[in-house]
Image (cartoon, helix red, strand yellow):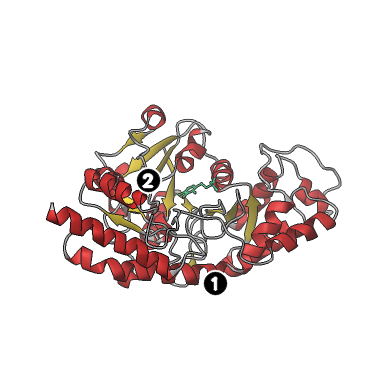
Amino acid sequence: MNVNNQIIPFNKPFVVGKELFYIAQAVMNGGIAGDGQFTRLCQEWLEVNLGCPRALLTHSCTAALEMAAILADIGPGDEVIMPSFTFVSTANAFVLRGAVPVFVDVREDTLNLDERLIEAAITEKTKAIVAVHYAGQPCDMAALLHLCDKHGLILIEDAAQAILAREKDRALGTFGHLGCLSFHETKNVISGEGGALLINDPKLIERAEIIWQKGTNRKAFSRGEVSKYTWVDVGSSFLPSELTAAFLYAQLEQGESINVHRRALYESYYHQLEPLEADGCLTLPCAPGGKPANAHIFYILMRSNEARGELIAFLRERGIYAVFHYVPLHDSPAGLRYARSVGQLPVTQEVSASLLRLPLYSDMTIEQVTEVCEAIFQFFAGTQKA
Ligand SMILES: *Cc1c(COP(=O)(O)O)cnc(C)c1O
């Protein structure tokens, strides 16, 4: 237990405003399937506040990535360049279409796709690049847009962690042809399970609506644009129910204030731990000036895998839950079967062995951040004596 005898979990889902009120309203609206009032409110909110021509809610970011793979016309044998240091859905969505993920190493600073390594990975079969904005920090979008333009590739952003994060005043998820968001309960803005597809290329909007509605023209039919409602393309059931959308709308309304608080927690971690970085005990995340975009994750890099394991155990004894990720995709069982890598991915290997995520959730307090930092200081004081 820590000093206050309270557990500090790694993550905690939370209600920030009118979630339950909106759910009641959705029930009273009469229909709670998808594409109702709250789905439309959420989509308009995303279109206005992020700045994209069309947003469609999905039941997860995984689903949004799967829609993106269909919309990008990814087929058997096509290659899709992406990092190995990411969540499985980034790769799975394309493997489901028969494509081959091609893993490229990440940058040492942002832990995002290293744009300098991409050109060497491009072949005649390359169809798309997936940019994962790790921890909500932006990939080098100017470089990626340039590469996609030059080689005629589709740019898909896995912006699962990047809600309301911006790069030069433009929201992440709105740079590529398509962007994918997550509202899973571990993210900043949540609805239990949930996601959205941002369709930034207007040419893809009509087909996106069809794929979203199980391959039918139901959307055009409900707008009175066609007289028959029928099967016109491939598709699936990608929509969330109105209950999910109602919960999400309340969270979106508080999205900016959620991020303001998370940034304060992040900056507190950053400044309290700076002396340990100066002593060479650990490395802090690279957000310029300690100012993160949306403070989705606060991580530290330990000096070894062993030290990471020891710190996790030390914190756990004090009721503090810190976790690590990712097990890199390139040497996972499915990664070996379905994908290939360009080179040895040394940064990915190193970071996945040493990265530790500290507790960060939206109703965490600065005092709790201080408790976690004090425990980390104690850990290093102990290891230096030993
Ligand atoms: C969370 C996450 C996903 C998956 O999101 P779901 O909404 O749970 O499907 C995909 N990619 C990245 C990078 C993520 O962090």
Q: Are marks 2 and 1 in contact (CB under 8 Å)?
A: no
- The reply to whether residue 182 is in sight is yes
Residue 290 shown left or right of residue 5 in the figure: left
Q: Position of residue 288 (x, y in %)?
A: 32, 69
Q: Amino acid at mark 1?
A: Ser
Q: Position of residue 335 (x, y in %)?
A: 39, 32
Compared with 274, 346 (above or below) is above
Image quadrant holding the N terminus, namely bottom left
Say what secondary structure mark 2 lies in: loop
In the foreground, 277 or 369: 369
Q: Which residue is mark 2?
A: 325
Determine which of the numbered discs, if any, sits on residue 336 in the image: none
Q: Position of residue 229 (x, y in %)?
A: 82, 42
- The reply to whether residue 292 is in sight is no
Q: Position of residue 28 (x, y in %)?
A: 84, 57
Of mark 2 and mark 1, the one earlier in the sequence is: 1
Compared with 56, 66 (above or below) is above
The part of the image, by quadrant, that contains residue 29 is bottom right
Number of numbered discs visible in the structure rendering = 2
Say what secondary structure mark 1 lies in: helix
Q: Which residue is mark 1?
A: 257
The part of the image, by quadrant, that contains residue 283 is bottom left
Residue 63 shown left or right of residue 107 in the figure: right
Residue 310 shown left or right of residue 18 in the figure: left
Crowd rating for badge 2 (residues with CA inside 10 Å; few <14, some 14–19, many 20+): some
At 85% from the left and 43% from the top, the residue drawn is: 228
In the foreground, 361 or 149: 361
Q: How far apart in space, not on screen, are marks 2 and 1 (Cα)?
A: 27 Å
